[in-house]
């Protein structure tokens, strides 16, 4: 068994009006990956996309900070995270193993901005889809970072905030929290 953890810290908190934070636990046991994510103080009553990001070439990903706001608009948007965090890789939605990222199957925060996500993922299927998507790359959780995304559609975003994915605009993809995934123990 392998266990990985991430302490998830706020990103863009001053601008969005909430300091989303929480933790993620990933347990690899045989052919199962159990994912537990618990978040507090996210924008309330809305869906939050959550994924791990990384580099297909195996370089370790780092979390984005305010320093990644390269266009100086006050927001660290999804494209600005890529130089340090890599690309979006695995979604934590209803079916992570299908690697279907743009959809409406992500957790929804309650009125207090809280949500908990638990999913048991068939590791063999996830690994096969991951290798297909990223040229035979390995999952390598300890080289990845987790992002939580999403702000209210009523939040005024400058036109410089990018991150449109499929039919979803930057309100859906704006990062609100991030954490570095680290290896905790191996049995």
Image: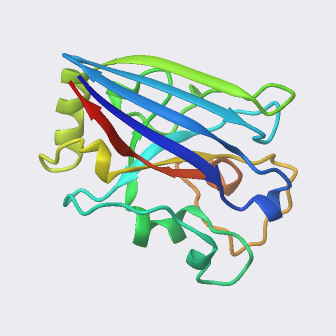
Q: Residue 58 placed where, x, y %?
A: 20, 58
Q: Position of residue 153 (x, y in %)?
A: 81, 48
Q: From what the image shows, is residue 13 above or below residue 108?
A: below
Horizontal relation, residue 51 to residue 11: left or right? left
Does residue 108 show up? no
Work out which quarter of the rendered image holds the C terminus and state it: top left
Q: Quadrant of the N terminus?
A: top left
Is there any visible trace of residue 98 in the rendered image? Answer: yes
Q: Residue at horizontal 69%, vertical 26%?
A: 115
Residue 80 in percent (x, y) is at: 53, 71
- Residue appearing at x 75%, y 29% in the figure: 114
What is the basis of the colouring in this image? rainbow
Q: Nearer the viewer, residue 163 or 13?
A: 13
Quadrant of the image occupied by residue 130: top left
Q: Quadrant of residue 28?
A: top left
Is 171 on the left or on the right of 156, as rendered? left
- Name the residue located 65 percent from the left edge and 56 percent from the top edge: 174
**Vertical relation: 105 (above or below) 65:** above
């Amino acid at each position: 068994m392998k266990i990985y953890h991430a302490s998830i810290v706020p990103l863009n908190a001053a601008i969005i009006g909430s300091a989303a934070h929480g933790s993620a636990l990933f347990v690899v046991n045989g052919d199962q990956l159990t994912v537990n994510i618990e978040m507090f103080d996210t924008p309330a009553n809305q869906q939050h996309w959550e994924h791990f990001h990384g580099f297909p070439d195996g370089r370790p990903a780092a979390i984005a900070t305010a320093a990644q706001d390269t266009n100086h608009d006050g927001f660290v948007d999804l494209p600005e995270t890529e130089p340090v965090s890599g690309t979006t890789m695995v979604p934590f939605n209803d079916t992570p193993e299908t690697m279907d990222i743009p959809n409406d199957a992500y957790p929804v925060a309650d009125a207090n901005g809280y949500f908990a996500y638990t999913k048991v993922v068939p590791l063999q299927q996830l690994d096969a889809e991951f290798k297909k998507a990223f040229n035979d790359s390995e999952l390598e959780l300890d080289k990845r970072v987790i992002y939580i995304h999403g702000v209210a559609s009523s939040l005024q975003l400058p036109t410089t905030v990018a991150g449109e994915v499929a039919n979803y605009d930057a309100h859906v993809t704006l990062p609100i929290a991030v954490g570095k995934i680290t290896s905790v123990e191996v049995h």
